[in-house]
Amino acid sequence: MNVDLIRKDFPILESSVVYLDSAATSQRPKVVVDAVSNYYLTMNANVHRGVYQWSSAATDAFEGTRALVAEFLGAASTEEVIFTKGTTESINLVAQTFGEMHVQAGDVIAVTRMEHHANFIPWQQLALRKNARFEIIELTDDLRLDPKEIERVLSLKPKIVALTLMSNVTGVRNDIAAISKAFHAVGSHVVLDAAQGLIHEEIKISDLGEIDFLALSAHKLLGPTGVGVLWGRKRLLESMPPYQFGGQMIQEVGDYESSWNGLPHKFEAGTPDIAGVIGFGAALSYLKKVGRNAIAKYEAQITEVVLQEIAKISGVTLIGPKSLEDRGPVFSFSVASIHAHDLATYFDLNQIAVRAGHHCAQPLMKKVGATSTCRASFSFYNTLEEARLFLAVLSQANAFFARKGKEPHRRRSHVVS
Amino acid sequence: MSYRDVFGEVLADHHESPRYYGALPLASKVEHGFNPLCGDKIDIYIQVEDGVLVRCQFEGEGCSICMASASILAERIQGMDRLAVLTLIDAFREKMAGATVVKGLPSEDSQEDDLVALYGVKRFPVRIKCALLAWTTLKKAISEGDTP
Ligand SMILES: Cc1ncc(COP(=O)(O)O)c(C=O)c1O
């Protein structure tokens, strides 16, 4: 993989900004933007409706992306690929249809402490609605899933287990194959939040053991915002009631009752984000051309450098695992004497874009014992020089802000009361 | 680039040595302020007697802008009339929302006034809410039970 050539595909990277927030949203190569505008400029029409050329061209392009997603994931059929607005909507869809019909009072629903709010709250609220028991799989001190906790929750035979492929805070990658098989063996259904992770390595559904549902967002995979996918096992999707009602999802509408379209359209009510879906197709084709095996190899070099060098800066604490195994190029950290927001502003003034905050993972932050941290997340279009620059600025910030013997939040008052 | 280059001497000083910091045992009220987006937290202790803010102190955990702003606010309002404080808070919010000249506030070029240093936060639009937390929390603390 030649990163200099790759960067030429991303016009925005010509800017002097060092973008280290790809876990929030990736940048898009020009081919994606072109595919979106090509739709509007040459075939703008609604899908699955018109009999005229534009509509059939748009429908072909739209359904072409569905085939690319099926290939990307290794899905058994395009019927299992449902377009949504994003990971958040995909998970809510499962919770409000499958969850609603499958969970009874007294049942157990389990999540992990490292979940993004999008894969936490829908289950917490489902449990509240159903009077079900909500269980959280706790983490070890280095913020990986605790095997003892997995055993404990397995023994509760949860109806649904929802977990993430990769943490958006620590970069931890979970062993989904082993975990999902174990939960399936006790009768659980497994919902995978795959918003993070899929861009970093070649993973197919068959590598993920016995998952039942998978949610992803196009915008974290070089595609446009506003598009996501829910993948689910066909027999489960068939058994589920529709999520929303309206155009496209029906077969026949009578005065007093209606029947539903088949998969995947049953879950796609209303006009979808046609341009976005078409752009996502271009993103997946591009990603395939670069190759996720090459990406994984390249990013491992960045991860190694960052892990090695960050450990040398005293006063900087890396949150989560410090070893290379089973993690992606996402690094959350705190600096003893600086609040995360001040640090992020400092980076910004040095033209480096990092994230500060709770990263939509307050349950995890509770365990970390912080209200906010800084996060730098890398992608395959970042260079090693950018990683080194980030480390240099971090070490500079640490030196400048550090003040001997001063705790950041326990300051002396000028006033004695 | 140092902290002072980024935020200026005045904010750095208030951040490092906040005025009126710490719990106030005689407080007639404690108001808690929280910014869920970034996790800044503040407790404002007030002692109001006969419509006068006799004393106001704060405690909290937050970024430098949030804490410096609380310190600058606290220094300014000790002993002020409660209604005058409310007017000041509204004026400051208006200023941070982009107004160039606001009645009752020092002008941008008054060098002697620490409050002016906070105007600089407008350069960092996402941080304005950090600068406002103490002010909105204090407003809550002193407006409750207001009779028209
Ligand atoms: C792990 C994880 N899950 C879910 C989401 C939500 O994705 P979206 O906002 O695209 O729906 C994100 C995005 O930040 C994420 O990182």
Image (tube, coloured by chain):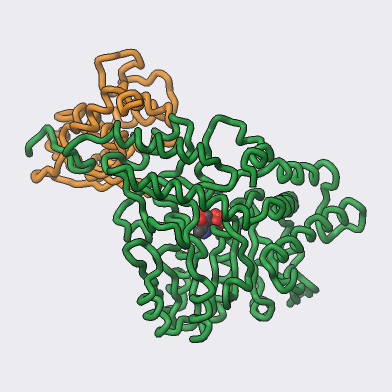
Chain colours: A green, B orange
| Residue depicted at 71% across the width and 41% down the height | A30
Side of A231 where A134 appears, left or right: left
Side of A39 where B88 appears, left or right: left
Q: Quadrant of residue B83?
A: top left
In front of the other: A365 or A120:
A365
Does residue A369 show up?
yes
In front of the other: B27 or A295:
A295
| Residue depicted at 57% across the width and 78% down the height | A210
Quadrant, the N terminus of chain B: top left
Instruction: Say above or below: A17 vs B4.
Output: below
Q: Residue A125 in the image: x percent, y percent?
A: 45, 69
Instruction: Say above or below: A204 vs A168.
Output: below
Name, please, the residue furthest toward the right: A52
| Residue depicted at 51% across the width and 86% down the height | A185
Does residue B57 show up?
no
Q: Residue A55 in the image: x percent, y percent?
A: 86, 54
Quadrant, the C terminus of chain B: top left
Q: Residue B25 in the image: x percent, y percent?
A: 9, 45
Q: Residue A34 in the image: x percent, y percent?
A: 75, 42
In front of the other: B113 or A15:
A15
| Number of numbered callouts drawn | 0
Side of A63 where A395 appears, left or right: left
Q: Quadrant of residue B87?
A: top left
| Residue depicted at 70% across the width and 67% down the height | A81
In front of the other: B84 or A354:
A354
